[in-house]
Amino acid sequence: ITFNEFETVVKSLKMGHLFRNPEARHVPSFQCINYNVAVADSETITSSGLHKFMYSPRPASFPQRWISVTTPADFTLKALAIKYRLHPLALEDALVDDPHVRAKVDNYDSHLLIGFPLLSIAPRYHVNHSKVEKDAKMESYGSFSSLKQPLSAPARPYSRIKPQPLSEDSIVSKKPEPYAISKLRKSNAFIFVTRPGLNTVISVVPKESGDVFKRARRVLTVSYSRLRAYDAMYLTYTLLDVIVDSYSPIIDEFASQLSHLRDLLRKQASSSMFAKTDMISPSQYHDLMQEIGLFKRWVVPGQRVLRHLLEDELVQPECKIYLRDVQDNLNQIYDDIIGLEEGTKGLKEEHRQLLDSRMTSTMNGLTIVATAFLVSKRIIDMSFFVIRS
């Protein structure tokens, strides 16, 4: 028996043992695209067709394959790990998806793993806090069926109520609060590229990130796509390019908020001390500095990932030209982050100078008032002395 035959038998046994799990009957669907130079065939794999997909080889007429998985999909990832011999450590990264994990690239015998951050602006809502508090109190009293219990039964204290998710009627509007700093939301995209043939790509993204690779699917399925003429590393380049392009709206959002705070500060500086104008608080630019710092912290490891791919002999020289373009875009994003950092520091210094100027003006005014009061008191004392004399 050859090693390949032995490996096939072991994989079949592992797959059979995995499909004994009742979880196999309720598996979320995922998409598989088989493509060649001429055409791309897209198929949605559901629970009913999962067993056939895992045991069947790909059609001989399609040398390349892209499997797009949206988490949570633990059973699907475990089955794909058996089918494509994914390393347990790489599988653990995709299953856990720790938001604190930085971008990385790992080389294994059977595949290449690329982890890259997915960043977006978290939505902010106006919340009807009275409605939330009322719902929490009703939850603490229990349902109407609990009224049949004896009155002596101890009630749960209000302070121990667990936080409940916001209901739809608790959200007044989906407009952001005025002058509130946007918050970053981070998750991870994991890309598996099988070796040594570089003919299969498995992308894993969380459900809350949305359809981030919609553009890549559209490019792959058009009739004149050049992407189908190359191996899986060109598809990997396209996925990374889509992720890096999604960082540009974040730069625009933070730049807009920095410009707004600067205009607000200058309006405050040009107005009088007692005018009723919108005041900028130190917490606003502190929050902006914090979010920009997090943005920078997550972008820098991505630069190292692209640098590693450009130095890897596994990537063809023709593909490195495209990866170098993604690296240039990410470097431009990094330069924009540095510019935002410097602008925020300048805003902080300008605000500090304004507060010092206001404080100096206040102390000067108080000094004048105190001096006038002392002089008037002296005059009054002298007048009483003259009258008394």
Image: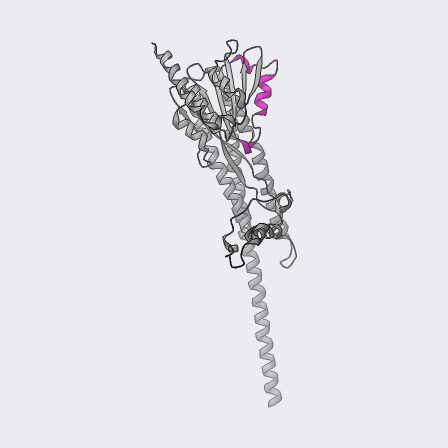
Q: Which residues are magenta?
A: 207-230
Residue drawn at (51%, 43%) of the image: 289
Residue at the bottom extreme of this rendering: 389
Q: Quadrant of the C terminus?
A: bottom right
Instruction: Give percent across and percent down for residue 291.
Output: 51, 41
Residue drawn at (56%, 67%) of the image: 367
Q: Is residue 359 left or right of residue 112?
A: right
Question: Is 77 drawn above or below residue 229 in the view shown?
Answer: below
Question: Does the rendering let one see residue 233?
Answer: no
Instruction: Give percent across and percent down for residue 79.
Output: 45, 23
Q: Does the stretch in magenta take in 330?
A: no
Q: Is residue 21 left or right of residue 248?
A: left
Q: Is residue 364 left or right of residue 116?
A: right
Residue drawn at (54%, 31%) of the image: 207
In this picture the colour scheme is one colour
Question: Does the rendering let one see residue 93?
Answer: yes
Question: Is 240 drawn above or below residue 55 in the view shown?
Answer: below
Question: Is 159 drawn above or below residue 213 in the view shown?
Answer: below
Q: Quadrant of the N terminus?
A: top left
Instruction: Give percent across and percent down for residue 333.
Output: 53, 32
Instruction: Give percent across and percent down for residue 3.
Output: 34, 12
Given residues 389 and 52, the one toward you in this image is 52
Given residues 286 and 358, the one toward you in this image is 286
Q: Does the stretch in magenta take in 223?
A: yes
Residue drawn at (49%, 17%) of the image: 232
